[in-house]
Amino acid sequence: MKLLKEFSINLLIGLNVFILFFLFFEKRIEIPPLLKVVGRTHPLLLHFPIVLLILAFVMEFFKKQFQIEEKSFKKLTAFILFAGSLTSASTVIFGLFLSQEEGYAGDTLQWHKWTGIAASFLSCGLVWAYFENIKAIILKTVMAITFVFLMVAGHYGAGLTHGDGFLLEPLASGEKEENRPDLKNALVYDDLVKPVLKDKCFSCHNPDKAKGQLVMTEINALKKGGKTGKLFIEGKSGESLMIKRLLLDIEHKHRMPPKGKPQLNEDEVAFISAWIDNGASFTTKLSAIPATSKIHGLASALYGGLAHESFAFNPADEAVVTKLNNTYRLVSHVAYGSPGLDVSLFGRDAFNRKSLEELVSIAEQIVHLNLSGMNITDADMALITGFPNLRQLNLNYTPITDKGLKDISKLKDLESIMLSGTGVTTAGIIQLSALKKLGNIYAWNTSIQPQSSDSLMKKYPQLHIETGFENDGKDTLTLNNPEISPTNAFFRKPFLLKITHPIGGTNLLYTLNGLSPDSTEPLKFQKPFLINKNISVKVMAAKKGWASSKVIERSFQRSSIKPDTISLKTTPHPLHKGQGASTLFDLAEGSTDILYASDGNWLGYRNQDFIAELGFRKPTELSEVILSTLTSVALESFPPTEVEAWVSADGKEYVLAGKLNPAIPGEKSRIEHNMLNIPIKKQRVTYIRIVCKSLRKMPPWHKKAGAPSWFFIDEILLN
């Protein structure tokens, strides 16, 4: 028995000495993969010392209540105490292994770590004290102290796993419901986006636990992104890392949040996408975004909208509402169950006075009216005064002037009006100041200067007037990049290319000869122009008083012929199977990030050749075969070693029509779409077989030298 006691004490001392050794050298220790697996059992193992030690404490404190023979009871308590101390030391060691992995840092980790270590040391001392029959009062005191450390370690551990405030979160749910944001005054990020991220993302992406080196709790860190790059691209949700990861299959290893964690619902993902598409501003109010933006409807779906406002009028006849909806007019309820109606008109050429007169049957119920871009005149404005309950009016980019606003001043319940791009002046704003409920006026791209709006807001403190940014010449700001549409790189029929920029008066300079517009005589964009062949467009934005934008390049590749049948003779990898054979002719360009190649736009092959057969109902003249592939050395995606095009008249006997041996990229090659043009003679074909032989062994300089590479293809272009 004595030998067993000594072995138990020595084992516990040895484990705790190892903990001290690890702490002393932890910055120099590199954990091997097998021990990383062991470390990841820490969250599972930690439940054992908590249960065992608490059970031993209860047995010692209340031993008189147990009807067990004293000697047997003492042995049982000693065994449970030893088991608790043993699992406590093991849990600490496994936790130290886990803490060496990426993403664990901060005060919460330190509290969890040191209180856990203290509990391990104390429990080891308790086993020794119990075997040595130390006085009961001392034993119980140390047990009480150990219990405190155990609870504190557990609390901070829960904070690392589930985020701050996890324990008391249910008590705050009622308060959260009461503190639902006021959408009229809500900041899009602080009041609407951040709560979603806090509930679903902050627990793994905070200063204490920064998975992927990504911290989302602080704005500057959120803008910076993590080790895989920026989290979002302003105005482009479809190209943003955040949205791509949110939309991955739940089983995908890069899905965020990962399987087993609380997931964002469809409305939350759609809202964050809309926030990014609207510029991902951290300071913009929801009310400053045009009412036509889908972000308003999504905000109402998530947080509730005007449904919480009580209206004194009765709902309109649903049959009338249905009848008023047509191609150029949308009539809908502002929120479920609300009698208030939102009316939006579209198509400038289709608009006329009758478009408003037809709304008389629902005049009382209209609370939102969107006439943005319509050809409404000052004379037509009198009709709008027939909508007595109007709260929000959008007149952006209409021909109205101060004269038309004279009638608007009769709408006593108006709360917000949008006048950007109109002929309104300061005098018109003064007319509107008589409206007691009017709070927000948006007048971007008008003659109203910031100084004038500041004076008006001082004189009429109930008004908030937005006139946009005005460069005073003191700061040289860089123009944001111009936008080219359409965005798709592949096309079948000729199309009109359009270049736009959100800042008025900006010159859009472009070239079609491969030269940069800042180093040659560029063309100035005036109107959309025709694209009917393979071409590369380079564009930059320039404006006096501003630094020019970056030069952006967009290549367009024509695929004028689509086969009648498409058959894959080799099966793509399960993780990268796209949409099957149809992927090759859907004109959809794949992302250059291999992590998201499973977005449906790529077919991926590894350690296997790509073979596809294309068929035509009748012989078709063909002179060009181009394969759109992905080159990404860092992500193991290489071009094939050999590409072949075979043709056949009957689908049985094939002859070689063209062959290509792409160069293997070097170590510093950049990620890019690689267009492989197979040289073939002009001929009529009924069947064509494409064969791409993938690279079986990556070059010696690669970190995975000798392993098979990936081969990715997103489109076959035939002309």
Image (tube, grey):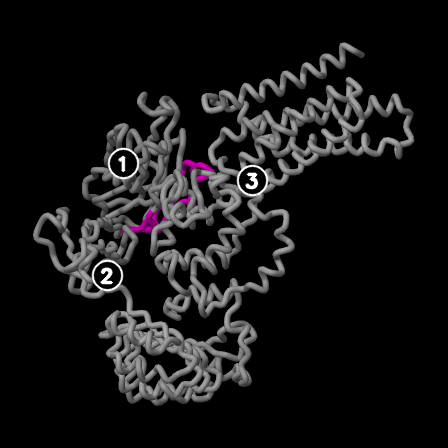
Q: Which mark is residue 670?
A: 1
The boundaries of the magenta stretch are 561-589
**In the displayed structure image, the side of residue 448 where residue 128 appears, left or right:** right
Q: Which is closer to the viewer, label 3 or label 1?
A: 3
* Residue at the spot 49% in from the left edge and 37% down from the top edge: 106
Using the image as rendered, state which of residue 607 and residue 437 is in the foreground.
437
N-terminal of the pair, mark 3 or mark 2, is: 3
Residue beneath disc 3: 160
The reply to whether dot 2 and dot 1 touch (C-beta < 8 Å) is no
Instruction: Give how far apart the Cα atoms at labels 2 and 1 are.
Output: 29 Å
Q: Can you say whether 525 is above or below 702 in the image? A: below
Which x, y percent locates residue 138?
A: 76, 27
* Residue at the spot 53% in from the left edge and 26% down from the top edge: 36
Q: Amino acid at mark 3?
A: Leu
Which x, y percent locates residue 262?
A: 56, 48
Q: Amino acid at mark 1?
A: Arg
Instruction: Give how far apart the Cα atoms at labels 3 and 1 are.
Output: 38 Å
* Residue at the spot 27% in from the left edge and 36% down from the top edge: 670
Q: Quadrant of residue 289?
A: bottom left
Residue beneath disc 2: 500
Decide whether residue 216 is among the magenta residues. Answer: no
**In the displayed structure image, the side of residue 440 where residue 180 appears, left or right:** right
